[in-house]
Image (cartoon, rainbow, N blue to C red):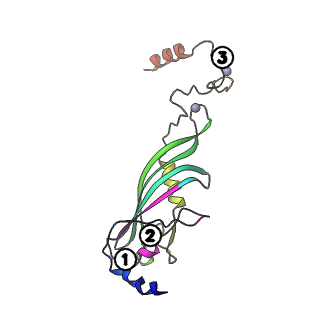
């Protein structure tokens, strides 16, 4: 109990960049306790590593998530800056097979104190101090997916006639390479 005397002294520590692990909610590891920053001076910064082997957020399966969440106390609330790398389960745009595609993304969002809310879409800091990062992680990781996603650089895709996955088998329709006719067509359209 003697340690209780020291609790308030944390307020007098100089503002320093610290790494704190405060992800301890097993049912939602992307729930972050940021309440301890509400009463910190403007300019206080904390960095929190958020690393997960696997998480499913609605329809999105994410593995090998490695991210740093940087929290800065501002006048309006907390500025959240995230630098994340992960693999997302997606479908190859050529052969349609599922695979995990590595993506990198950086994003920032401002969480505002309720009194500062201007629009309904603003992110608001909850009274209990816990913010749920699942939806913004999901959104930004999906945005990081390229339009063309190939499972391997030389993915052969599907046979346009029978739909066979040409990475695994070669079908009877592949005896003549279709490239010559395609090139002719390309030239006529130019
Ligand atoms: Zn493929
Ligand atoms: Zn075929």
Which of labels 3 and 2 is toward the front?
3
Label of residue 173 in the image:
3
Which of labels 1 and 3 is toward the front?
1
Against 40, is 49 above or below? above
Mark 3 or mark 2: whose residue is earlier in sequence: 2
Toward the front, the furthest residue is 2
**Which sits in the foreground, 20 or 136?**
20
Against 140, is 5 above or below? below
To which residue does mark 1 refer? 40
Mark 1 or mark 3: whose residue is earlier in sequence: 1
* Residue 71 in picture, x, y percent from top left: 40, 66
Viewed as shown, does residue 67 lie left or right of 45?
Answer: right
**Which sits in the foreground, 39 or 25?**
25
Label 1, label 3: how far apart the Cα atoms are: 68 Å
Q: In the rendered structure, does residue 41 fall within the stretch colored magenta?
A: yes
Q: How crowded is mark 1: few (under 14 residues within 10 Å), some or many (20 or more)?
A: some
Magenta region? 24-51
* Residue 107 in picture, x, y percent from top left: 41, 55
Label 3, label 2: how far apart the Cα atoms are: 58 Å
Dot 3 falls on a residue whose secondary structure is: helix
Residue 49 quadrant: bottom left
CB within 8 Å, label 2 to label 1: no
* Residue 43 in picture, x, y percent from top left: 31, 71
Which of labels 2 and 1 is toward the front?
1
Disc 2 under 8 Å from ligand 1? The reply is no
Mark 2 or mark 1: whose residue is earlier in sequence: 1
On-image quarter of the C terminus: top left
Disc 3 under 8 Å from ligand 2? The reply is yes
Q: Residue at x 49, y 86 (%)?
A: 1
To which residue does mark 2 refer? 119
Against 24, is 65 above or below? above
Q: Which residue is drawn at 60% across and 31% down?
A: 95
């Amino acid at each position: 109990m003697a340690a209780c005397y020291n609790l308030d002294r944390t307020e007098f520590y100089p503002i320093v960049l610290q790494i704190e692990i405060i992800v301890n909610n097993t049912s939602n590891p992307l729930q972050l306790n940021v309440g301890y920053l509400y009463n910190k001076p403007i300019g206080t910064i904390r960095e929190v590593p958020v690393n997960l082997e696997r998480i499913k957020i609605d329809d999105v399966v994410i593995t090998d998530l490695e991210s740093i969440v940087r929290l800065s106390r501002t006048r309006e609330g907390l500025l959240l800056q995230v630098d994340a790398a992960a693999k997302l389960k997606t479908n190859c745009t050529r052969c349609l097979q599922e695979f995990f595609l590595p993506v990198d993304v950086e994003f920032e969002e401002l969480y505002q104190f309720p009194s500062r809310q201007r629009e309904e879409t603003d992110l608001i800091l909850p009274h209990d101090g816990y913010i749920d990062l699942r939806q913004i992680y999901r959104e930004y990781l999906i945005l990081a997916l390229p339009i063309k996603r190939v499972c391997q650089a030389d993915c052969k895709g599907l046979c346009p006639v029978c739909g066979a996955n040409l990475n695994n088998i070669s079908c009877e329709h592949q005896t003549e390479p279709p490239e010559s006719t395609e090139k002719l067509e390309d030239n006529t359209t130019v």
